[in-house]
Amino acid sequence: MNSLLSLFFCFFILLTSVIQGYFVAYPLLLSLVILLLTFSFQGFPVKILMTMGLVSSQKAFPIILILLLIGAVTAVWMAAGTIPALVYYGTQLINRQYFILSAFILTSFISVLLGSSFGTVSTVGVPLMIMVKGEDINPHIVAGAIIAGAYFGDRCSPMSSSANLVASITKTKLQKNITAMISTAWLSLIASTLVYLILSISNPVEIKNSNFISEIPTLFQINSLVLLPAFAVIVLCLFKIEVKITLLVSIGIGFVLGILVQGYSFLQMMKFVLLGFDLEPRMNLSEVLTGGGIFSMLRVSIVVILSTSLSGLIIGTKTLATVENFIKKASSRSRLFLGTTIVGLASAAFGCTQTLAILMTHQLMKEKYQQQLDNYQLATDIENTAVVLSPLIPWNIAGLVPATILMTDSGFIPYAVYLYLIPLFNWVQFKLAESKIKDKFE
C-alpha cells in the first residue's frame, strides 16, 4: 500500500472524526494502526516502527506533568474565586464604544495568566459573547477578537502547554523563547489593535445582557485577596522561577483561599483538583465557571502521546521526503521561514491538532535550522507559524473547540487578525532585511 495514500486516508479519518465531534484520540490511534500496517508491508520491521513511535512519544513526557498541573490550576483558581474575580472585574472594564478592542485586550491579558486558549475562551470569552447576544453586530467579529486574544497567551505565556511543548522538543529555555516571541510579535499586536479599534468604532455595542455578571458576587467572595494566585504567577515568572514550581505555588495559595475565603472543605478542594470545579446549585453561571482538574488533562495528555508517536512514524519512515527535499533548497532566511509556514499549515491541516502541527513542523525543519541557524530560532519560528496557524484551520480542534464554546463557527477566522498577521509580518521583515543587505553590496 502506498504510504502517501495511507497518509491521506488517515487525514480523511481525522477530518471526519473532528467534524463529527469524536474524541480525537480514537482516530489518532486508528491512524497509528493503519500506518504501522502500511509500513510493515513496505518492509519496515515492526519492532523498528514501534521504536520510532516510542522514542518520539517520550518527547511528550516532560510536558505531561505541566498539563496536569495546568488542569489543577484552572480548577483551584475557580474554587478560590480567582477566575470569577478576573471575569467580574474584567468585564466591568469593558468600554461599550470599544467593545471589540476591549474584548481582544482583556482575553489577551487573561490568556497570559491562564496560559490556556480553551480556558480563556471558556471563562472570559463566553460571558463576552453572551453580552453581545441580541446586539446589531456580527458575532463572528467578536469571536475572532476573543480567539485571537486567547492565543496571544497560548503562544507566549509561561503557563502555556504549547509554549512548554515547543521548549521541550527544541531543548531550549522557555523564558528565552518568550522574550523572542514578544520581540517578533509587537508589530502584529499593534496592527491587530488598530484593526480592532476600527472594527469597534464601526460596530458599537450597547451590552444588554450583562446582568448575569452581577451573580458572581452572590456566589463568591470577590476581593483583591482572591487574585493572589494570579499575582504569584506573575511575580514568580518575572523572577524566572521554573514553571512547575510556579504552578505548584499558585495551586497551594489557591487551595488555601478556597478553604479560608470561599468556604470549601479540604475534601471538596481535593475533589476539584482531581475532577474539576463544579458550581452548585446549577444555574446559568455554572455553564461558564466550571471545569479544569487533573482528569480533564488526561485526555489531552493521551492526544499528545499519540500525536508524538504518529509524528515519529511519519518522519522516521521518510514519508514526507518530497517536502524535506523542498525545504533543503531554502537558501535565505525568508525562504526558510516561508517553508516553515507551509509545513506548519500543512501539519495543522493534516493532524487536526495544534500538538501534531508543532511536532511535525519540528521534525521536518530541525535539521535545516541546525545547519543554518539554531534551536532558539526554530522554536520562535514554530511559535510564529504552526502554533498560530492551527486555529485558522476550520477542522483543527485548536479553532473548532473555541468556536464551538463561543456558539459560533469558522466565520470567526477572517477576524482573528493577530493570528495570521504574525507569520505575514515576520516573513515581510525577513524579506526587507534581505533587500537591505542586497542593496548594501550592490
Image: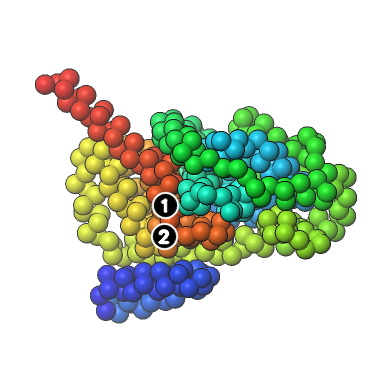
Q: Does residue 364 appear in this view?
A: no
Viewer-nearest of discs 2 and 1: 1
x, y (%) of residue 232? Answer: 71, 35
x, y (%) of residue 132? Answer: 58, 49
Amino acid carrying label 2: it is Pro
Frontmost residue, 379 versus 125 = 125
Give me the residue at 68% from left, 44% from top. 87
Amino acid carrying label 1: it is Ile
Frontmost residue, 403 versus 161 = 403
Frontmost residue, 92 versus 178 = 92
On the image, numbered disc 1 is attached to which residue? 413
x, y (%) of residue 391? Answer: 44, 53
Label pair 2/1, CB-CB below 8 angstroms: yes
What kind of element bears circle 2?
A: loop
Q: Does residue 9 appear in this view?
A: yes
Tell me the distance, in whole angstroms, between the alpha carbons under discs 2 and 1: 8 Å
